[in-house]
Image: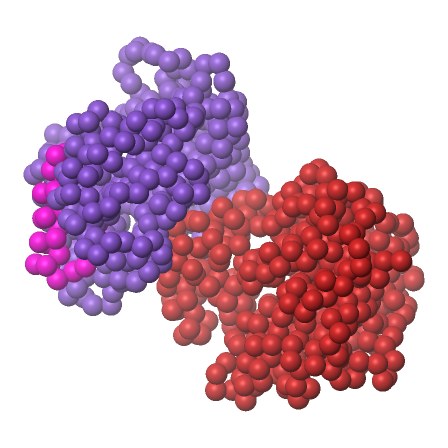
Chain colours: A purple, B red
Amino acid sequence: MHADALSALGNLFGDRLRTSLETRICYSFDATRKTFLPDAVVYPVSAEEVRQTVLLANRHRFPVVPRGAGTGFSGGSLPVRGGVVLSTERMDRIVSIDTENLYAVVEPGVVTETLKAAARERGLFYPPDPASLKFSTIGGNIAECSGGMSAVKYGVTRDYVLGLEAVLGTGELLRTGVATAKGVVGYDLTRMLVGSEGTLGIVTRATLRLLPHPEAAVTVLALFRTNRDASGAVNAVVAAKVTPSAMEIMDRTAIDCVRAVAKVPLPAGTGSALLFEVDGTADSTAREADRVEEACRAHGALEVRRASDMKGRDELWKLRRAISPTLLQLGAVKLNEDIVVPRSRLADMFDFLADLSGRSDVRIVNFGHAGDGNIHVNIMISGADEDETRRAEEAVAEVFRKTVAMGGTISGEHGVGISKAPFLEMEVGPLGVAVMKRLKECFDPNGILNPGKIFLDEAAVRG
Amino acid sequence: MKDADLKALTGLCAKCGTCRTVCTLYPERKTEIAVARGKIALIEAAMRGEDGDAEGVQEALTDCLLCGRCERACPNQVLVEEIVMKGRADLAEEVGIPAWKRVLFGKVMPSPAATGIARKAAAAGQRLLPGKIPTASGLHYRFPDGLGGKGRTVPKLPGKGFLESLGKAEAAAGEVMLFVGCVFDHVFPGVGRAAYETVKASGKSVAVFRDAACCGLPAMVSGDRRSAAECAEANVRRLRAAEPGAIVFPCGSCLLMFKRNVFSLLPKGTPGYDDATYVAERAVDYASFLLSSGVLDRIPDPPSGQNVGEIGYHDPCHLSGTLGKGPEAREALSRAVGPAFAEMAGADLCCGYGGTFNVRDYPTSSRIGETKVTVAARGGTKVISTACSGCVLQMRDMAARTDPALRVVHIAELVHQALFRK
């Protein structure tokens, strides 16, 4: 970056501009574990500072890469072309919570869990629950349109964003959306920005829809012999007119991983597990849990367990929560994909993945949000064997081709970032990519905001 | 940086960000460089040869309280404390450590005689300080603002340390050995005395470890592994020679040193390893000893004189967090003071001391500490009890800053009071 640009940033941010190598290294990574060094890091505390940063970027032509907590799995916050990482972690105020009209106004750096807790204190509910909710930020969730366990019933981040304030690539401050329950005026610029991975605008404030908090919840764990049995039960639960707030699936390898750690006794022959949660009133949850149990038993469940108190529910959730940390037993490197297929095709996808694992000779562990058809396909490799790495990468491409062929999508919640950019056209087609690029030019004519993301970029490939 | 072990240790970090949620320092710094995954990224970059400025990395690694919260929260069980300490040690070899630390760790702390002399000199010098202030826990001195941190108060150092106050014949040998620790010997001899007399109430013969060097933790966390190993090796050799059945530690940090950290200094294959193992197997925290030895059964009658719920317990990071010894202290406390004990608001919040961190960045250390004691006091706690020397030092200072009526004591003082109540 040019010295004049750094000096102008220094005037703007004072000691909130950091250029030491140490700080730059600390903002060079995310959960993909890839690294790209930025030239500087800034910590704005207001929309005006964000705006001034983007104006300077236009004048001096340097990239601005917004970053929440850097917890993404697709490289969305990596500075692949250097420039300035704009960290929103100091814009972390919950501005207001409107208990009558059921919405919250927050700054982008608010940690998702913090908002959920603040809403809960007032008897309200902010449903999106990405696995990273304890550390990821609302701004990052909006940029990536994060999902989570409860998406099957409550939807994803997009469904709770009523309106946004964002700085566009031009440095203009745009306000979109509404603070009311409805609003259909003009193009939906709010949705345009949600999931745009910081390439169209930098969110500086968000108005988020809240719901009344459910009174009660019941957790049901059902153990099956095969993924096909479990997938059948998922569809049967939906057919029984129950919409659980979570419907999670784990395959045999995932179960084997957690067996030792979770210390949950499992019957012999367990090859697949489903974890359901139903929420609502005490009466309705009891009835719905009954229906879930019936559907599971009808589809060959080896065993069904159920809990309605916090301690018992935690015990059942242990199995699911233990997966991620235990995966490293299987390999030092995890290729972590998040495909979605139509729910009715779950069993077919599981069969395909089992076959692919055998053909490619790589370990594939599958678990995820069965209710959404969202499977976390984790290919575990040592990282030290070139041939194994090549086979794994080919397997990933094959998974994506199969997903699209089944009418699915290559990312349910991680976003495109840099890791799925090579496959974007496979899903959206050449015209889709072209229109997206035209939109990008409209919001960010000089290509200032988060370059190298979504669309294939040589710099990102090199990293 | 060259330590090959570091690569294996850091390789487990998935950069997920869990450590951000629990880091004691992060709310103060609001930057990635403060948290574990940032520090690990720095070490990884250094191992790849991308570190331009070793002093900058050293500065970043030093900026950590080693409270271990990140390590306990980490889904991949990354050994953050060990990584940070190894990183500091490698860098200390490369760029050195400050001169005052070199003298303190290398010359004063390994020698029981030298620490006594240092205390006497400090006690004499302390009288020259202005600003005596009264507090519930005794007289403190307030440091002048330019020296040692704005508003800092320090305890009045005694003329005689605890060990010095013991008669020569007293506690020369016994089946139980008490490791008092530097602070409870030289700064708060009353705590040392209370621990000694309550451990003696077990009816077992109790010896006090008189040849103690510093446990070595301050040197180790500062990257001075040579001084730390020297302290540790001398201690375990002398302790083993005394052949105690159990070694009781009133200070959680000293205990951590002998239970766990010592093996990083005296690993398998080194001459000190067997002695270290012998000591680690017998090392026990003060509260666990009270529970197992029947001391608490000797409390004469149901305790009275304290208001219900006014005594809380602060979890020292090393003792409760790293070593998992939280329930024992609470059980002992309940038995000693009855319903006066209640779970304290923010019991597991770090006090912000962090050993040399408190010297290095007193303003931050005291902000964290003030939050700690304020949360406790707002919850209704009037007496904060704990079981670590650093926490006692810090929280007494914080109480003096925020609320002079708030008392900070070691649990041994409460047990002593209950046992020998008149």
- Extent of the magenta region: A342-366
Query: Height in image: B223 above or below A252?
Result: below
Say left or right for A139 vs B141: left
Q: Is residue A235 above or below residue A353?
A: above
Q: Which of the two residues, A74 or B327, is positioned nearer the viewer here?
A: B327
Q: Is residue A275 above or below residue B50?
A: above
The answer to whether residue B4 is magenta is no
- Residue A114 appears in the figure: yes
In the image, B118 versus A11, the foreground residue is B118
> Which residue occupies the foreground of this view, B181 or A87?
B181
In the drawing, does residue B89 fall left or right of residue A351? right
Dominant SS type (magenta): helix
What x and y, as percent, mark residue A5?
45, 41
Picture residue at 19% right of the left edge, 59% below the top:
A363
Q: Is residue A125 left or right of residue B413?
A: left
Q: Give the residue drawn at x 49%, y 24%.
A: A123
- How many numbered marks are there? 0
Quarter location, residue B246: bottom right
From the top left corner, tell me how far across and down residue B190 is, in percent: 83, 64
Q: Residue at x 21, y 24 (%)?
A: A241
Is residue B393 visible in the rendered image? The answer is: no
Q: Look at the image and say whether residue A355 sits in the magenta stretch.
A: yes
Q: Which image quarter is the C terminus of chain B in? A: bottom right
Residue B160 appears at what percent x and percent y?
A: 88, 72
Q: Nearer the viewer, residue B44 or A380?
A: A380
- Residue A99 position within the rendered picture, expressed as x and y whole percent measured from the top left: 50, 18
Q: Residue at x 64, y 80 (%)?
A: B245
- State left or right for residue A256 relative to residue B357: left
